[in-house]
Image: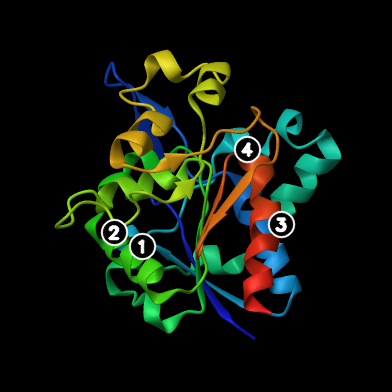
Amino acid sequence: MSNILFVVTGADHWTLADGTRHPTGFWAEEVVAPYEAFTGAGHEVVVATPGGVVPTVDRASLAPEVNGGPEGADRVVRAVASFTQLQQPLKLEEVDPADYDAVFYPGGHGPMEDLAVSADSARVLTGALASGKPLGVVCHAPAALLATGNAVGGSPFAGYRLTGFTNAEETQAGLAEKANWLLQDRLVELGADFREGEPWAPHTVVDRNLYTGQNPASAGPLAEEMLKALR
């Protein structure tokens, strides 16, 4: 049995280019699907957030239209509620990635607000990458990699094949023109070898011990890829 650390955004909004706050948080499917995959395989999950704040679920991620209808929406609401570790997060500042067998970052727009500039998250990410243990990052959560860009010699993620929420998906979601910056652009600037799949379709990329997924539909498949390394 492995101990898996979920690093979850503590932000409840994303500041847009005009200064307005777009309500957000973590995306439910990106937490629920990996949590169910990991715990279903017998592993333990621990949650950490910046400051140890109880994370906010993006209300849009609970809507029937993104969950296959009312029944799917009801199921994901129940699943988030049953993930009790979300109510008792550790402080990210106090987390040592060496204490865990894998690290997983779910998305939502929240990481664009806090994890993208978090030195504590950067420390966890670089430690997890250097350890050789599975490090999973999905959808908007690769924004957290941007905080590693100030490392001496550049980001340790430069040159890695990876994916994340694409410019095309942000445009189709209606937020690209309102954003201060786009994730795909920044990851390319960081030096990553960004691999883009079809919008909204499951797409995962594995490079050494870095596991990345493009969008919400990729969260479950990404967890399954990580489980192969934990068996």
Question: Which of disc 3 and disc 4 is earlier in sequence?
Answer: 4
- Residues at discs 1 and 4 in contact (Cβ within 8 Å): no
- Residues at discs 2 and 1 in contact (Cβ within 8 Å): yes
Evaluate whether residue 82 shows in this view: no
Camera-side residue: 78 or 45?
45
**What is the CA distance from the residue labelled 3 to the residue labelled 1?**
27 Å
Question: Which of disc 4 and disc 1 is earlier in sequence?
Answer: 4
Evaluate whether residue 175 shows in this view: yes
Seen in the picture, residue 57 relative to 99 is either above or below; the reply is: above
For badge 3, the amino acid type reads Ala
Task: Name the quadrant containing residue 22.
Answer: top left
Q: Which residue is mark 1?
A: 125
Q: Which mark is residue 79?
A: 3
Q: Which residue is mark 4?
A: 61
Task: Name the quadrant containing residue 18.
Answer: top left
Which structural element holds mark 4?
helix
Q: Tell me which residue sits at (44%, 68%) in the image.
A: 89
For badge 1, the amino acid type reads Leu
Question: Which of disc 3 and disc 2 is earlier in sequence?
Answer: 3
Q: Which mark is residue 122?
A: 2
Which structural element holds mark 3?
helix
Residue 69 image position (x, y, % from top left): 83, 33
Neighbourhood count class around disc 1 (C-alpha, 10 Å): few under 14, some 14–19, many 20 upward: many
Residue 99 image position (x, y, % from top left): 42, 83
Query: Which tag is nearer the camera, tag 3 or tag 1?
Result: 1
**What is the CA distance from the residue labelled 4 to the residue labelled 3?**
12 Å
Query: Which tag is nearer the camera, tag 1 or tag 4?
Result: 1
Instruction: Answer with left or right where residue 181 lies relative to residue 230.
Output: left
**What is the CA distance from the residue labelled 2 to the residue labelled 4?**
26 Å
Q: Which quadrant holds the N terminus?
A: bottom right
Which structural element holds mark 1?
helix
